[in-house]
Amino acid sequence: MTERSEDSHSAPPSRRWLLRAAVATGAVAATSVVGAGPLTRAAADVGAAAYPLPGHVTGDIRLHDPSFVKRPSGGYLVAHTAHGIGLKTSTDRTAFRNAGTVFPGGAPWTTPYTGGDRNLWAPHISYHGGRYFLYYSASTFGSNRSAIFLATSPSGDSGTWTDQGLVIESRESDNFNAIDPDVVVDDQGRWWMSFGSFWSGIKLIQLDPATGKRTGSAFHALAGRGGGPVEAPTLFRHGAHYYLFASFDLCCRGADSTYRIVVGRSTQVTGPYLDRDGRAMMSGGGTEILAGHGSIHGPGHQDVFADTDSDILAYHYYTPNGTAQLGINWLGWDTAGWPYVH
């Protein structure tokens, strides 16, 4: 149920930059910057009162709802909310450039859900078996007359995408909202797609790896806030658990946005997901790991992915003048297996 725009953002940091950010928030003594080695848990654990700044990124970093995939040839491809779904590329996860759109000629098949608006929301991009898979949302603000579609491409480049049709839709008579897709492959090789926004919350369905489309009719309920603001699920497997990251509260109000990122975990991909205090995410639970602080407003609609140097948290946030930008931080794990941002 989030209002989207064409802006976008994303980025990751160097160790020295992260330490400078920690110094700025009072998390690490200034002397730690000189000759810094690997960032320790104690140095990175800044807590809710002093979250770290986003890492340094440059170039074309305005966006909403970033989703990252590492390319087999090297570098990164980012999909984001925009007319026709925006694309950006980066060779180093720091400098980003515009790479056009998924559908430069438009996507008229989405009109029944968008009312003719060309803006398509909240994509999730991944790479499997020599093809890129892109799940994306079509809707209008405040409505659950929504749909999630699938497109595939051999290269991921603008104009090479073929739409594969509808994956799931929701109607006004339904108690869920079919937007904000995210796909995870479990430890048995099964594909799952989480999605949802407001209404009855976050849902999970199984996909057929051969087609990328839904298989069966089962729904699993993962998180809810009694109709309140929860959306943008991301499922990530780490150790013995699946972690459900979600965005609570309100996006897309510029510097007045209240988005924040929370997490729960389960030993089963289908749940139940509990937060650090044992509260069920289906009953409004969720441990906060990032929220607005200082000049960083409304961080959310996160993506989590594994990279060679660290697990990465990517998200958008708003500057004080209301510009949506890409944020990137390292994601660490404490001794109890809970994630923290640094």
Image (cartoon, rainbow, N blue to C red):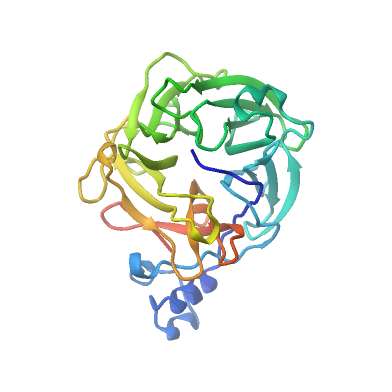
- How many marks on residues? 0
Using the rendered image of the protein, determine whether residue 311 is visible from the camera's viewpoint: no
Quick one: which residue is furthest to the left in this view? 278
142 relative to 8, above or below: above
140 relative to 316, above or below: above
Image-quadrant location for residue 242: top left
- Residue 65 as seen in the image, left or right of residue 219: right
248 relative to 26, above or below: above
Using the rendered image of the protein, determine whether residue 107 is visible from the camera's viewpoint: yes
Foreground: 18 or 149?
149
266 relative to 66, above or below: above
The image position of residue 193, as x and y in percent, is 46, 29
Q: Residue at x 68, y 23 (%)?
A: 163
Foreground: 188 or 28?
28
Picture quarter with the C terminus: bottom left
The image position of residue 296, as x and y in percent, is 50, 65
Q: Residue at x 37, y 34 (%)?
A: 201
Q: Residue at x 72, y 34 (%)?
A: 155
The image position of residue 27, as x and y in percent, is 38, 75
Foreground: 13 or 116?
116
Quick one: which residue is furthest to the bottom in this view? 31
Quick one: which residue is furthest to the top in this view? 216
Foreground: 256 or 123?
256
The image position of residue 102, as x and y in percent, is 71, 35
Q: Residue at x 30, y 47 (%)?
A: 286
